[in-house]
Amino acid sequence: MTRDTRNNLIFLGVLLVLTLPPMFLLVGKAWRGEGGLNATPPAAKIKTAYLNPVGVGSGVIRIVPPATDAFVDDLARDLTGEPAFRLASAGGRPSPLIGEDFRLELLGELDDETLLVIWLHRDGADLDSVTSPAGGMRVVTHVDVPSEVRKELQEGPASAIISGYSGYAAPPRRVAVVALKGTVPERLTVSWNRGEMAGQDTIDLSDVTPTRASTLPALPNADIPASQQYPR
């Protein structure tokens, strides 16, 4: 064996001693799910508007954009003279009462009727009829959704930088306000027709008590302003 060959073998031996232990550690971490060769960073939490019906995966945080919140509250005040109904949920943060399919929202009370908002599809067509097993219903009015509200739903609140916001690609152009006469049940289902199109949504009120928005406390949050918080 020549001197050069012996030196090359010694060099390779030293190189193996230096590189193999770290490689074994990386493989071991990957095997145990602790990271390693193909480790991926934890996924950021996705945030979207509370009325966005499009699924954005598990663990989504639904927020209440301020312009959207103000639009609904102004609508309630115009029709009832009172703020919109809200819930003190997730530690006392005010949140809307929205249906299971994110189309029906509890608005307020007018005399002996309960008012609800139906967020219509983007074509903006008005309702022809509305019904509920809970009692008689009527259409009160239709209102255009302001352009700044639609933009906010698509792009996220302009008043705060919210990372991971998933926009409402085709937000409603119009809402319908409908009224239910009589007692509100624990599960309120409302159905409606618009030409050849039909819709339905249900609000579960079995464990909640609606409260006027002005009476609810707002707690701080490091990521989202209190007026926009609605974890779901």
Image (cartoon, rainbow, N blue to C red):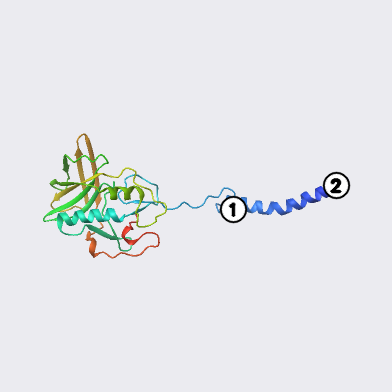
Task: Give me the residue at 40% from left, 59% from top.
Answer: 223
Percent from the top left, x then y, of residue 1?
88, 45
| Crowd class of label 2 (few under 14; some 14 to 19; many from 20; radius 10 Å) | few
Residue type beneath disc 1: Lys
Is residue 7 positioned above or below 215 on the image? Answer: above
| Crowd class of label 1 (few under 14; some 14 to 19; many from 20; radius 10 Å) | some
Percent from the top left, x then y, of residue 75?
20, 53
User: Residue at label 1?
Assistant: 29
User: Residue at label 2?
Assistant: 4
Which corner quadrant of the image does residue 230 belong to?
bottom left
Which corner quadrant of the image does residue 130 belong to?
top left
Q: Nearer the viewer, residue 76 or 12?
A: 76
Which corner quadrant of the image does residue 64 belong to?
bottom left
Label 1 residue SS: helix
- Looking at this rendering, what residue extends furthest in the left direction? 111
Quarter of the image that includes the C terminus: bottom left
Percent from the top left, x then y, of residue 115?
17, 52
Task: Give me the residue at 70% from left, 52% from top.
Answer: 19
Residue 230 placement, left or right of 6: left
Percent from the top left, x then y, of residue 157?
34, 54
Q: Nearer the viewer, residue 223 or 30?
A: 223
- Disc 2 to disc 1: CB gap under 8 Å: no
Residue type beneath disc 2: Asp
Task: Give me the residue at 22% from left, 56% from top.
Answer: 73
The mark closer to the camera, 2 or 1, is 2
How far apart marks 2 and 1 lie (CA) works out to 38 Å
Q: Earlier in the sequence, mark 2 or mark 1?
A: 2
